[in-house]
């Protein structure tokens, strides 16, 4: 916990390290009530920092120093200085060796940072600054060293001993103990260090690299999960092949290992050669994991594997550069998933997520640029902005340079910076140099926070046959900076004629030859007009195709035009987008009616449009499912000036009810046809099967709104007889949100009884109930917290119950009496002492207080103030609370 005023760290203060570490030799002695860590660091003065030998200040927290020696000379009390975050010693020469031994307590580490225990196994999480809780070190990413690691532990409890790199020896030790030594020849920062010890089983496979050499692949899990590794292994091999083919990147060690652990703060971690995963991102089989979980496993396995190049071989100079590896790697994993599944559906999911959550972050008190200028606690900057907006920025570079130019740039980047710790500027420089372009203005995407608005207007001149689009960009104020300069906004677009065909796009002044029907305009000014010629009749523009930039675009479409685009746009993403905009217009109208106390009346055009989509058998069923999904309550909140939680909920539920009733026959037909296929086909985790089940399941959730007995019967049939978790969990969720109390209770009980020994499935069981918007939500969540399968010490459980309640159950969380806010604040105060990273993340919904009415604002602020006054806060929680109240 924090004792003094927390320090703000600034990018502008960056300085290269005074000393470097060439070799790191570690020995861990693991015991049940403590661990000893012996470190030998082969060090030298950093020549970049000039002559002289300043004091050497090593990072270290919660360490009990037992001894220290410089070049084999034991240090006495007066030779060094210790405080609660550092050890200072005084080198006598340019090159020297520092030995330390410390005692630590992984067995009581509930923060899950550094060395800790997850169940019976030891594991580590060092990113960003966890290594300093293991030993005294220069814990910063621009200090890169080779590592040799020896682990000594009781043979019987910990038969498997793992660390980074290649295994170089193992054998028995005294007192029933044994040892293993690992050597990692690639220089790496300490945040990529990993150690695992436990009673683990593994599945093994191998992969033959393009160059012909084999790599051993192993996935380590607790014995009961050995039957749930195949999907991750297949995903890993696909990822390795894809990175060779698409980026020319080969794997570099003889062995690649993944370990699944139950207690993990995030999704997974790319430690060199030894990725450690949240078990939710590894384990998957039909009976226990949904289609979404299968796709998440595939994506996260790819993400961590891709980090071997974008993150490990080329790493970050400092933590302000985090998006260098995260934005790029998210972009890479998204492209991989697009290639493995449906590209359009993947894009729709990612954009919906970005617009709901990253746009909200960008509009809130924690808004920051993709490359932040300052932070108090770096753990708070593993954000949607750094990851998802960062990926959009890389995507725009590719849109501007084209696929080939982008590949030239990435080749140069990897070649030029292999083995280095670099910056986002270095990344862009490689793209510039490989393509002979200037991206100076483009780099504002890294330095300016906030979501740009792009207002578009049109004029048509029939006599001249010209059509002009005028773009006006602006960016709202964010807490960090007031004035924003114009961005470079790539706008992919097409123009549709009255039949829905794409017109050739010839800008004024261009020759007629070779005119494409889709182009990318670069909007670089605050206001800019583009004029197309040879346009014989007024066209309909299709703007920002594929969501070519992370902006809020507005164009005055009317509803008939949106319906036309839904049917005719040649860009699949924009067909979906037109449907979303139509639904937003219709829902906002309903919200207004609700607020004025009028009877709700749904624009029948929404039903017509969805009916057309539903009746189109040639459309990808996954697209049909996406188009049938109305914009979520969180998105409707994000686009509101003042979000009226109850009106949003009432309007959206009313629309869903109307859709269910008026399109009942079509929904029922498509449900039955798809359920029939599911019944007669074995489960396959592949795009066309995901697609079929997604349409089947969204149809079922609409159908149940009618309360018809035939739907109840179908739901019970699916719940009882499905051979996979996707269908079973949807049926359960449908029952949980239905008025059929007896059936709901029975299903919940049967499900829990059947899956009580599978924690990941129980997480789903908690989530489905926590997200249910039926009245009494908070009481249900509080009761579930008493369930024997629940514990605050496991992040997955906290996310499943508390996260789902505060993030998805908006009517209950925002109850007018403030009970939801009080509950969350109490929880954050309790979690603050146990696990600061999780506490700080759960806080996010309270930071959005500016979106709500005055009464709710006061209640939310009151709870933030109560947290601030609650005593010794971690830097994680302190930063978020204090910035939210500022
Ligand atoms: N670098 C990891 C990833 O991309 C995520 C990560 C960062 C992390 N900090 C962490 C994981 C702390 C667990 C705990 O995907
Ligand atoms: Zn990552």
Image (spheres, rainbow, N blue to C red):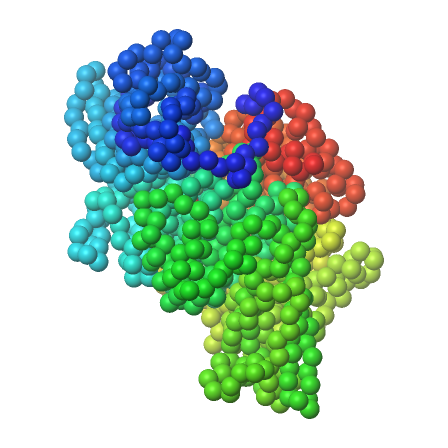
Q: Quick check: can you spot residue 73?
A: yes
In the image, residue 377 above or below residue 254: above
Instruction: Specify the quadrant of the image occupied by residue 375.
Output: top right
Which quadrant holds the C terminus? top right
Q: Residue 119's x, y, as percent?
A: 38, 29
Residue reaching furthest to the front: 51
Give the percent coordinates (x, y) of residue 371. Answer: 52, 46
In-image side of 209 versus 367 (left or right): left
Task: Give whichever of 672, 821 is nearer the camera.
Answer: 821
Pick the front one: 569 or 656: 569
Q: Camera-side residue: 602 or 404? A: 404
**x then y, percent, for residue 16:** 42, 36
Outermost residue, top direction? Answer: 77
Residue occupying the point 37% across, 58% down: 410
- Residue at 66% across, 67% down: 527
- Which residue is pictured at 26% across the width and 44% down the height? 256
């Amino acid at each position: 916990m924090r004792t003094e005023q927390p320090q703000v760290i600034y990018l502008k203060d960056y300085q290269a390290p005074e000393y470097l570490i060439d070799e790191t030799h570690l020995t861990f002695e693991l015991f049940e009530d403590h661990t000893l860590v012996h470190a030998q660091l082969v060090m030298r003065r950093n020549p970049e920092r000039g002559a002289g030998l300043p004091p050497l200040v090593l990072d270290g927290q919660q360490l009990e120093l037992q001894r220290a020696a410089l070049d084999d000379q034991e240090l006495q009390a007066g030779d060094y200085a210790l405080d609660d975050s550092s050890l200072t010693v005084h080198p006598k020469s340019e090159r020297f060796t520092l030995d330390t031994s410390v005692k630590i307590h992984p067995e009581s580490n509930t923060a899950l940072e550094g060395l800790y225990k997850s169940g019976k196994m030891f594991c580590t999480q060092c990113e960003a600054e966890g290594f300093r809780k293991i030993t005294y070190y220069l814990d910063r990413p621009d200090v890169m060293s080779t590592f040799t690691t020896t682990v000594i532990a009781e043979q019987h409890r910990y038969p498997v001993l793992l660390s980074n790199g290649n295994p170089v020896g193992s054998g028995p030790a005294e007192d029933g103990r044994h040892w293993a030594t690992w050597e990692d020849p690639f220089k790496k920062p300490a945040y990529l260090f990993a150690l695992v010890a436990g009673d683990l089983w593994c599945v093994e496979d191998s992969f033959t690299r393009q160059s012909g050499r084999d790599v051993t692949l192993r996935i380590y899990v607790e014995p009961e999960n050995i039957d749930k590794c195949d999907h991750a292994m297949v995903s890993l091999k696909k990822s390795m092949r894809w990175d060779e083919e698409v980026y020319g990147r080969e794997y570099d060690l003889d062995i690649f290992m993944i370990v699944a652990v139950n207690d993990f703060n995030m999704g997974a971690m790319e430690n060199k050669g030894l990725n450690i995963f949240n078990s939710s991102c590894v384990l998957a089989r039909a009976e226990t994991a949904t289609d979404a979980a299968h796709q998440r496993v595939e994506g996260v396995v790819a993400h961590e594997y891709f980090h071997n190049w974008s993150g490990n071989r080329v790493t970050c100079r400092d933590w302000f550069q985090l998006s260098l590896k995260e934005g790029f790697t998210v972009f890479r994993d998204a492209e991989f998933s697009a290639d493995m599944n449906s590209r359009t559906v993947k894009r729709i999911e990612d954009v919906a997520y970005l617009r709901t959550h990253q746009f909200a972050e960008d509009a809130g008190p924690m808004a920051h640029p993709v490359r932040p200028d300052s932070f108090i606690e770096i753990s708070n900057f593993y954000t949607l902005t750094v990851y998802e907006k960062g990926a959009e920025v890389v995507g725009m570079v590719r849109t501007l340079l084209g696929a080939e130019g982008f590949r030239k740039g990435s080749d140069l980047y990897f070649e030029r910076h292999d083995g280095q710790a670099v910056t986002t500027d270095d990344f862009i420089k490689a793209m510039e140099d490989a393509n002979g372009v200037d991206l100076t203005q483009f780099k504002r995407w890294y330095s300016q926070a906030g979501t740009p608005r792009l207002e578009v207007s049109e004029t048509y001149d029939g006599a001249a046959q010209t059509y002009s689009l005028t773009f006006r960009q602006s960016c709202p104020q964010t807490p960090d900076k007031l004035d924003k300069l114009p961005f470079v906004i790539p706008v992919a677009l097409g123009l549709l004629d009255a039949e829905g065909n794409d017109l050739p796009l010839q800008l004024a002044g261009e020759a007629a030859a070779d005119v494409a029907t889709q182009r990318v305009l670069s909007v670089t000014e605050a206001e800019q007009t583009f004029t197309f010629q040879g346009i014989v009749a007024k066209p309909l523009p299709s703007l920002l195709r594929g969501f070519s930039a992370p902006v809020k675009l507005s164009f005055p479409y009317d509803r008939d035009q949106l319906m036309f685009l839904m049917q005719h746009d040649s860009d699949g993403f924009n067909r979906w987008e037109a449907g979303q905009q139509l639904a937003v217009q219709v829902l906002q109208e309903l919200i207004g009616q609700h607020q004025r106390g009028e009877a709700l009346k749904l624009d029948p055009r929404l039903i017509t449009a969805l009916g057309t989509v539903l009746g189109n058998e040639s459309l990808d069923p996954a697209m049909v499912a996406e188009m049938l999904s109305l914009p979520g309550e969180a998105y409707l909140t994000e686009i509101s000036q003042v979000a009226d939680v109850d009106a949003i909920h009432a309007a959206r539920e009313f629309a869903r009810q109307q859709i269910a009733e008026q399109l009942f026959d079509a929904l029922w037909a498509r449900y039955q046809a798809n359920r029939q296929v599911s019944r007669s086909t074995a489960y396959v985790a592949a795009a066309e099967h995901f697609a079929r089940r997604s349409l089947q399941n969204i149809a079922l959730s609409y159908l149940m709104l009618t309360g018809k007995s035939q739907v109840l019967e179908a739901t019970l049939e699916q719940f009882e007889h499905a051979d996979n978790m996707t269908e079973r969990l949807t049926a359960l969720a449908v029952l949980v949100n239905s008025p059929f109390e007896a059936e709901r209770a029975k299903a919940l009980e049967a499900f829990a009884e059947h899956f009580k020994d599978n924690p990941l499935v129980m997480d789903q069981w908690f989530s489905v109930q926590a997200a249910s918007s039926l009245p009494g939500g908070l009481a249900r969540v509080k009761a579930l917290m008493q369930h024997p399968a629940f514990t605050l010490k496991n992040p997955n459980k906290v996310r499943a119950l508390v996260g789902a309640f505060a993030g998805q159950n908006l009517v209950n969380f925002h109850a007018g009496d403030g009970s939801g806010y009080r509950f969350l604040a109490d929880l954050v105060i309790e979690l603050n002492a146990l696990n600061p990273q999780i506490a700080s993340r759960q806080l996010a919904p309270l930071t959005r207080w500016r979106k709500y009415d005055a009464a709710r604002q006061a209640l939310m602020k009151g709870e933030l103030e109560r947290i601030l006054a609650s005593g010794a806060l971690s830097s994680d929680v302190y930063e978020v609370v204090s910035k939210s109240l500022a």
